[in-house]
Image: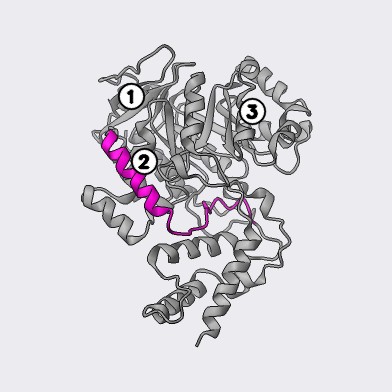
């Protein structure tokens, strides 16, 4: 199969696809069966292109052979907006997905709200060129603002239209947990939509039904407690070595979330393995610590190996906007080298060290956007975290490095965020707060950053 057969938009026949790629994955050798009945099993297999042996996990409920690396479609390459407002660079998306499939990736996760509402359509265009049975589609019921049954069903059906499919492999109730039991009941139970989705699963239009979680332990326990009635087929959780035991007040330790899923035999899909990119941009002394152990590996590879090491993880999602990130992740999982107990202890020590640095838990998901007052909230928070990691934050005007840190912050801030969209324009309306999956009190953080910037500007 020539690469330009795909990039030119020509559909690939089922026979041709499985001859060159899918057959190699389906007949993967070297399987490692996990202990116990109904557990996820693991195997590796040549993708068929000589690029390495992707690690696959088997869903014990369906037998799906899922690539351990999943493609998260929350962020895509962008270009100038089209007339309809679409900012996605479709040709770049096609190239990324072509290379991912070439490397063995077969799980693609999107949502109606990703990429300002255009992710599903772009994902559908890219994947529709391949046989439908050669990949797994995951999308979500993102009924955040209007959870009437009519609107929810309309969103569900629109997803199928955008994705150019008549069934969804993995369908999720999106971002449950924030708002507590009452909010969950209103969005999914009282309106009858959960019963509707269960019926859709029985009809085969949904192959696996689950939910993605951010929130309190109480909320998680409540929804997971519905398992005997609903039969959750999978659950998507935030898991990385920083959140494993140090998720803080806004979230639940991943060690607990994962453990509860294992008890019930529910496969885990992992989101935020890099904590919104923060585990690839750690402070210099933390990066040095990781690089010293593995000089030939990136800082990010440690986080991906951590997430993939746990045997009841079905797939690990990564938003790969750049080809070099995709290539690196393919290398990490082709095949996976699980972390040893000693390496897990090393990462726990690393997480404890990272707790000393007060970064804001923003994952740059952009759920808080658009701001009604035009503030670029993600850019402000991401810039602040970047400066924390680079050591460009200083409160002590008498310190030796204050002048240098002051200049570095102000110059980079003006470059990263237009002045009319900076933190000092926040009026504290709070519109953004309910949409943040991390539970960040965004106006408080923006006011704190605005005060800090004002102090920097007035200090000389």
Q: Quadrant of residue 428?
A: bottom right
Dot placed on the residue nearer the N-terminal end, 3 or 2: 3
Q: Residue at x 32, y 29 (%)?
A: 55
Q: Element type at marker 1?
A: helix
User: In the rendered structure, does residue 348 fall within the stretch colored magenta?
Assistant: yes
Circle 3/circle 2 CB separation < 8 Å: no
Q: Residue at x 57, y 68 (%)?
A: 449
In the rendered image of this protein, does residue 263 appear above or below residue 337?
above
Across and down, in percent, residue 7 comes to 41, 42
Residue placed under numbered mark 2 in the picture: 304
User: Can residue 318 be seen at all in this image of the molecule?
Assistant: no
State which mark lies toward you, 3 or 2: 3
User: Can residue 291 be seen at all in this image of the molecule?
Assistant: yes
Q: How many marks are shown on the rendered structure?
A: 3
Q: Residue at x 57, y 35 (%)?
A: 212
Mark 3–mark 2 Cα distance, whole angstroms, equals 27 Å
User: In the rendered structure, does residue 220 fall within the stretch colored magenta?
Assistant: no
Q: Nearer the viewer, residue 140 or 395?
A: 395
Residue 25 got which mark?
1
Q: Element type at marker 2?
A: helix
**Label 3 Cα neighbours within 10 Å, binned few <14 / some 14-19 / many ≥20:** some
**Label 1 Cα neighbours within 10 Å, binned few <14 / some 14-19 / many ≥20:** many
Q: Nearer the viewer, residue 394 or 407?
A: 394
**Quadrant of the image for the N terminus?**
top left
| Residue stretch rendered in magenta on the structure | 341-369
Residue 223 got which mark?
3
Q: Nearer the viewer, residue 405 or 235?
A: 405
In the rendered image of this protein, does residue 388 appear above or below residue 66?
below
């Amino acid at each position: 199969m020539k690469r330009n057969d795909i990039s030119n938009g020509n559909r690939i026949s089922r026979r041709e696809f499985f001859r060159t790629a899918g057959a190699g994955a389906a007949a993967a050798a070297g399987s490692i069966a996990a202990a116990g009945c109904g557990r996820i099993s693991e195997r590796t297999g040549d993708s068929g292109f000589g690029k390495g042996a992707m690690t696959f996990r088997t869903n014990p409920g369906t037998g799906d052979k899922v690539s351990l690396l999943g493609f998260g479609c929350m962020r895509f390459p962008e270009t100038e907006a089209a007339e309809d407002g679409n900012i996605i660079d479709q040709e770049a998306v096609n190239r990324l997905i072509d290379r991912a499939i070439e490397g063995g990736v077969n799980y693609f996760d999107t949502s109606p709200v990703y990429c300002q509402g255009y992710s599903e359509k772009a994902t559908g265009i890219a994947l529709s060129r391949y046989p439908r049975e050669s990949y797994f589609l995951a999308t979500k019921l993102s009924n955040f603002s209007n959870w009437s049954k009519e609107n929810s069903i309309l969103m569900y059906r629109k997803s199928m239209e955008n994705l150019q499919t008549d069934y969804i492999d993995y369908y999720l109730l999106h971002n449950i947990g924030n708002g507590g039991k009452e909010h969950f009941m209103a969005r999914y139970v009282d309106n009858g939509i959960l019963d509707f989705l269960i019926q859709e699963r029985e009809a085969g239009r949904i192959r696996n039904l689950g939910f993605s979680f951010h929130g309190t332990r109480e909320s998680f326990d409540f929804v997971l407690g519905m398992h005997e009635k609903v039969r959750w087929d999978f659950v998507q959780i935030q898991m990385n070595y920083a959140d494993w035991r140090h998720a803080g007040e806004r979230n639940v330790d991943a060690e607990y979330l994962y453990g509860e899923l294992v008890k019930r035999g529910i496969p885990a899909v992992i989101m935020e393995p890099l904590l919104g990119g923060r585990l690839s941009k750690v402070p210099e002394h933390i990066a040095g610590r990781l690089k010293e152990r593995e000089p030939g590996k990136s800082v990010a590879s440690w986080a991906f190996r951590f997430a993939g090491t746990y045997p009841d993880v079905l797939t690990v999602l990564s938003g790969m906007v750049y080809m070099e990130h995709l290539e690196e992740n393919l290398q990490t999982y082709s095949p996976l080298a699980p972390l040893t107990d000693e390496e897990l202890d090393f990462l726990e020590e690393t997480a404890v060290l990272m707790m000393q640095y007060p970064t804001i838990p923003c994952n740059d998901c952009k759920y808080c956007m658009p701001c009604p007052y035009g503030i670029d909230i993600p850019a402000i928070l991401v810039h602040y975290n970047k400066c924390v990691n680079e050591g460009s934050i200083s409160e002590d005007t008498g310190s030796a490095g204050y002048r240098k840190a002051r200049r570095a912050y102000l110059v980079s801030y003006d470059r990263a965020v237009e002045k009319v969209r900076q933190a000092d324009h926040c009026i504290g309306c709070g519109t953004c707060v309910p949409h943040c999956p991390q539970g960040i009190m965004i106006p408080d953080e923006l006011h704190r950053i605005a005060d800090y910037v004002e102090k920097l500007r007035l200090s000389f």
